[in-house]
Image: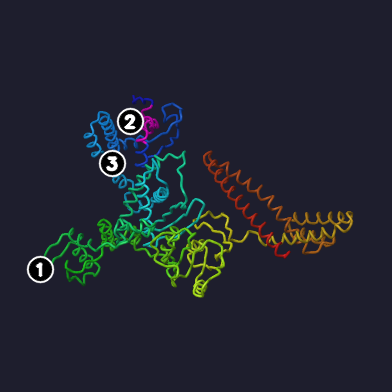
């Protein structure tokens, strides 16, 4: 006889656990449980059968994997949270009894947890961490622009502003910026770091307020994790680029609102080769010091040269050190691949990319787009945005003292080629000859020109973006779906619309001429014309179309008008017939689908239909605007 199955001991009831059960098992508060789930990346799951997972109950609740909760039970952060709870009880007891010395010693030995091990668990490789810093950067830039209050401390905002400046410094130094979009929410940036696309949002410099319906505690928990993550990532990025991390801060420039310019990028001293040489084993052979790296290099050179060149001189340690990667595991994998290359078959795949190969990828030709130019920012433009964009693409930029200190240029500098200005042109009365000559040499453009040049990957003509002119539409450079509306593209069926407009104009002229005549003659002409056009629209072969053409000629309709009207009527008939055929075919396809597939298919079709309607509405508005422009030009 087999073992009897007890209810709630197997299947979904064992695999899933409710939130209240998880909190009881971990013996922590709900706030601590939420903090642990955020830090460890554990989120609620949806079982197939909620009633079975909840042991027969249909009450609404959140479910978690039982394995995830067991994983949390051994978390060091949970132990620190328990220690902090005990510390809070001891501190309150000491303060209540007036034991100030014991309270002070308790405060000095306050338990503090670290998140370093969590970062290493969640991101096994550095590329995984770079791929996942989009949300971290958005959160950092958001908190850097928030005002301080009882929930958000000034030190936290200062740390976020420092991390944001460090990221901008690295992107400017490596020229990694690729796309920029000025939206209503803020400025979207996209950069390529280690062959990974990183997109983040920076809010505009307005006075921000924290809404009352936002739980700041949850956001602060995410921010705590993101600060630790970015600290690891930035240290690796700076050290791989040969820079000192953290970059030193000039306090005088920082007090003068220099922003990113208050940080100084310094190259690290070349002291790492000596450390790596000390790690390797060194022996003496015939009076020469030979390391283990030299032995490996000699073996590789012997294998590459073949059996005929076996006598290879062993290099010594005293020679000039070569630049090798610091990560030994990457280096050993490459060496093993090189040694086994001769024995491997011809169909073996290529080696996986490493940090060394990703860091040496060729940069885009547009990464130094503004290198030949020098810009001057007018006082009404946003200095942090355009300083970051211009410097990231190799250009030089200056600004007035009202926008902050640290400008490398003066307004009267002859090297300035472009002035970014966002106010209407004003004629100056007392302008000297030198100022007129300077104004003639420089090109005054609106801020959108800089962003559109970046997205286009080339320098655009400045005439369309001149001071005081109506700007062209600023389009999103990020990937859109194939059927998205593009204002710069020509309208579909533009030629047919022109023909329709001409037909409408001809009809208007005919109506004006016919109004002068009698109504009986108008009805006599209209009836045969309608019947002829209807026959032309329903013609199935060339013979029927020829018969309709002869009937139109007999009715007194010229060939040009007949052809245009026939095309118009045929187009309307096709539009009416096409949906019926598509619906019939879709119904046949739906019959072969399961219930889940059919619902998914209907949601997809609904989204496609909605996007198509939006595109058609925008195209219709554009057609109306174009027609209005043509009528105005003709009337003028």
Q: Residue at x 46, y 49 (%)?
A: 207
Instruction: Check if mark 2's residue and mark 3's residue have beta carbons within 8 Å.
Output: no
Residue range in magenta is: 8-33
Residue 203 in the figure: left or right of residue 252? right
Asked if residue 259 lies in the magenta stretch, the reply is: no
Question: Measured from the top left, where is residue 410 in percent x and y?
Answer: 42, 68
Label 1: which residue?
Answer: 287
> Label 2 belongs to which residue?
25
Residue 235 left/right relative to 386: left
In three-dimensional space, the C-alpha distance between marks 3 and 1, rounded to whole angstroms, equals 53 Å
Going from N to C along the chain, the mark reached first, 2 or 3, is 2
Q: Secondary structure at mark 3?
A: loop
Q: Residue at x 83, y 55 (%)?
A: 526
Foreground mark, 3 or 1, reads 3
Outermost residue toward the front? 430
**3D distance between C-alphas at marks 2 and 1:** 67 Å
Q: Position of residue 85 (x, y in %)?
A: 29, 33
Judging depth in this view, the residue of 269 and 249 nearest the camera is 249
**Circle 3 sits on which residue?**
113
Which of the pair 434/54 is nearer the observer? Answer: 434
Ranked by sequence position, the earlier of labels 3 and 1 is: 3
Q: Position of residue 401 (x, y in %)?
A: 42, 61
Please, what is the dominant secondary structure of the magenta stretch? helix
Query: Which of pointers 2 and 1 indicates the residue nearer the eye?
Result: 2
The way the protein has been coloured in the rendering is rainbow
């Amino acid at each position: 006889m087999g073992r009897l199955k007890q209810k709630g001991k197997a299947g979904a009831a064992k695999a899933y656990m409710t939130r209240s059960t998880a909190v009881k098992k971990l013996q922590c508060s709900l706030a601590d449980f939420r903090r642990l789930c955020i830090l460890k990346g554990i989120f609620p799951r949806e079982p197939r059968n909620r009633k079975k997972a909840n042991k027969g109950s249909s009450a609404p609740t959140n479910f978690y994997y039982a394995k995830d909760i067991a994983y949390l039970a051994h978390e060091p952060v949970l132990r620190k949270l328990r220690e902090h709870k005990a510390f809070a009880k001891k501190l309150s007891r000491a303060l209540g009894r007036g034991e100030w010395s014991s309270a002070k010693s308790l405060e000095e030995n306050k338990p503090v947890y670290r998140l370093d091990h969590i970062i290493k668990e969640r991101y096994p490789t550095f590329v995984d961490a770079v791929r996942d810093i989009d949300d971290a950067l958005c959160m950092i830039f958001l908190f850097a622009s928030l005002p301080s209050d009882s929930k958000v401390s000034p030190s936290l905002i200062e740390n976020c502003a420092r991390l944001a400046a460090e990221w901008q410094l690295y992107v400017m130094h490596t020229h990694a910026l690729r796309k920029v979009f000025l939206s209503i929410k803020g400025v979207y940036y996209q950069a390529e770091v280690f062959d990974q696309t990183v997109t983040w949002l920076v809010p505009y410099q307005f006075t921000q307020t924290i809404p009352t319906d936002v739980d700041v505690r949850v956001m602060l928990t995410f921010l705590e994790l993101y600060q630790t993550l970015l600290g690891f990532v930035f240290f690796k990025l700076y050290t791989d680029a040969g820079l000192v991390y953290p970059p030193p801060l000039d306090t005088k420039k920082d007090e003068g609102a220099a922003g990113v310019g208050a940080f100084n990028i310094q190259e690290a001293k070349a002291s790492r080769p000596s450390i790596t040489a000390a790690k390797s084993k060194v022996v003496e052979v015939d009076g020469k010091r030979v390391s283990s790296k030299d032995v490996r290099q000699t073996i590789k050179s012997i294998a590459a040269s073949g059996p005929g060149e076996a006598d290879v001189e062993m290099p010594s340690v005293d020679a000039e050190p070569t630049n090798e990667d610091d990560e030994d595991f990457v280096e050993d994998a490459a060496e093993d691949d090189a040694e086994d290359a001769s024995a491997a078959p011809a169909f073996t795949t290529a080696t996986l990319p490493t940090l060394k190969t990703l860091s040496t990828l060729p940069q885009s030709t547009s990464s130094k787009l503004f290198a030949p130019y020098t810009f001057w920012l007018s006082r009404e433009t946003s200095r942090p945005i355009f300083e970051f964009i211009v410097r990231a693409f190799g250009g030089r930029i200056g600004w007035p003292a009202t926008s902050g200190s640290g400008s490398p240029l003066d307004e009267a500098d002859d090297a300035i080629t472009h002035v970014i200005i966002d106010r209407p042109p004003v004629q100056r009365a007392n302008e000297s000859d030198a100022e007129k000559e300077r104004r003639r040499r420089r090109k005054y453009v609106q801020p959108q020109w800089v962003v559109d040049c970046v997205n286009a990957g080339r320098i655009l003509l400045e005439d369309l973006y001149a001071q005081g002119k109506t700007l062209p539409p600023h389009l999103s450079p990020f990937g859109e779906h194939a059927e998205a509306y593009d204002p710069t593209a020509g309208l579909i069926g533009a030629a047919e619309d022109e023909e329709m407009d001409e037909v409408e104009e001809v009809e208007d002229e005919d109506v004006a001429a016919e109004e002068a005549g009698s109504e009986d003659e108008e009805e006599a002409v209209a009836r045969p014309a309608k019947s002829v056009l209807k026959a032309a629209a329903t013609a199935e072969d060339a013979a029927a179309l020829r018969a309709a053409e002869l009937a139109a000629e007999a009715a007194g309709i010229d060939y040009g008008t007949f052809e245009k009207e026939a095309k118009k009527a045929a187009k309307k008939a096709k539009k009416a017939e096409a949906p019926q055929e598509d619906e019939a075919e879709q119904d046949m396809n739906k019959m072969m689908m399961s219930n889940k597939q059919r619902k998914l298919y209907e949601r997809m079709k609904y989204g496609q239909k909605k996007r198509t309607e939006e595109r058609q509405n925008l195209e219709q508005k554009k057609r109306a605007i174009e027609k209005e422009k043509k009528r105005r030009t003709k009337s003028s």
